[in-house]
Amino acid sequence: MNFNLGISTGSSTPIYRQITEQVRLAVATGRLAVGDQLPSVRALAEELVLNPNTVARAYTDLAREGLLESRAGRGVFVTRKRKVFTREEGRRRLEPLLDGLIGEAMAMDFTQEDLRAAFEKKLAQWKQTRGGDRNHE
Amino acid sequence: MNEQPVIRTQGLTRYFGARPAVYELDLAVPRGGVFALLGRNGSGKTTTIRMLLGLLEPTRGAGTILGYDIRALPPEARARIGYLTEEHQLYGWMSVRECGEFQSPYYPTWNEKVFRGIIGHFGLRPTTQVKSLSRGERAGLCLALTLAPEPELLILDDPAVGLDPVARRSLVESMIYLTRRSDRTIFFSTHQLPDVERVADHIAVLDHSVLRACCPLETFRNSVQQVRLRFPSAPPPLPKIPGLLQAFRSEGELRVTCVHYNGATEAALRALAPAQMEPVPLSLEDAFISYLGDRGEKSFILSETEAQP
């Protein structure tokens, strides 16, 4: 497992959401695979120097989404990967990411063609290293 | 939370001369978890703590701690409470170990393992004399002496004051260690919002001697919201918005921070016909500063239910 959580105080994102977002991303990109074990609530709380309730809350949210499962006496595991967001919710979240990307690229004077080419190239790279369409079960 | 709160006050008030230091305080601290008491300097935090511990007579009002009347705390109640202040009395000629040996006979519940653990955590050697300890090391020793009897309720009055970042982290770690027992409660005052983010379940906010929030930390964060409104030209004048804390105006933009942001707030802002309107997430520090700013409307954040939009 190649996964390290890190949190920062003073962020506009509450700490429990920093944890859920990092775990979601790690599952989505394959850094966390199905069956991987995560630290216990207590262990992660002590490692990150957090109130255990904060970690418990993040784990509960992730379990509700079907990403994690707590097996009594054994620990917390990544479960069968499910679609985290509905298609609509996914689109809503994708929108600002695209705006950010395009805005930054325009500010650096890339043309639409440059950007499209760079995007295609990146997609091809991802397909090679991660097997592409992972999101379809 | 059906259980009786470990700390409860009703109308607790203390005057110093004509000025109230704490005014009509209604506080409830649930059992278990970490409760942070926040507020600017002189807002009444220390006066509150001193009244809770029976060290200062209230002018009026009532309070209980572990179910006992704060005006008449019996010794058995005090034995269940750990209290850490800045002015912890230590003898300079004693060694660290001797400080523990000197205190332990007074506490039937003294846990030597906890004492040694915290001493070690702060990097203290048992043989070092108290008078040669640094400020952070001294704080570590005081914390070890306060935690070793494993108090049911731990009260810390600004424990982070004067600590360097390493000692402060050790303090936070020690507090987290204490939460291993879910029936233990920590009540602490502080200015360190990063520490609050790490450890606190609940917060209370005192402002000019008056309680202005007493709720889960998350409720507080959700209650204070900022919205950015963009306009094609100069923003219109701002009408009366319920719960307005702050408004910043710049060319083509209006940033509004409100408490108890809800449908009515949103409708009032939409009526300004902005070209674009989007929420701006706030850090705890920004939310806190907006909430205690002098410009806005004074509100009270009480419970989860009130904060729901």
Image (tube, rainbow, N blue to C red):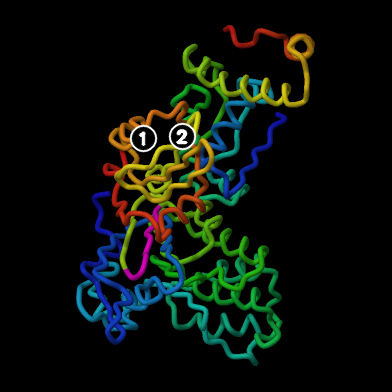
**Crowdedness of circle 1 by 10 Å Cα count: few (<14), some, many (20+)?**
some
- Residue A30 in picture, x, y percent from top left: 67, 20
Residue pointed to by mark 2 = B229
Q: Does the magenta stretch include residue B205?
A: yes
**Crowdedness of circle 2 by 10 Å Cα count: few (<14), some, many (20+)?**
many
- Residue A6 in picture, x, y percent from top left: 65, 41
- Residue at the image point whose x is 52% and y is 70% from the top: B159
User: Foreground residue, A19 or B275?
Assistant: B275
- What is the span of residues highlighted in magenta in the rendered image? B202-209
User: Foreground residue, A34 or A130?
Assistant: A130
As drawn, which residue projects farthest toward the front? Answer: B233
Q: Which chain's residue wears label 2?
A: B
- Residue B178 in picture, x, y percent from top left: 49, 60
Residue pointed to by mark 1 = B269
Badges 2 and 1, same chain: yes
Quarter-of-image position of residue B166: bottom right
User: Foreground residue, B212 or A62?
Assistant: B212
Three-letter residue code for mark 2:
Leu
Three-letter residue code for mark 1:
Leu
Task: Determine whether label 2 and label 1 are within 8 Å by CB.
Answer: yes
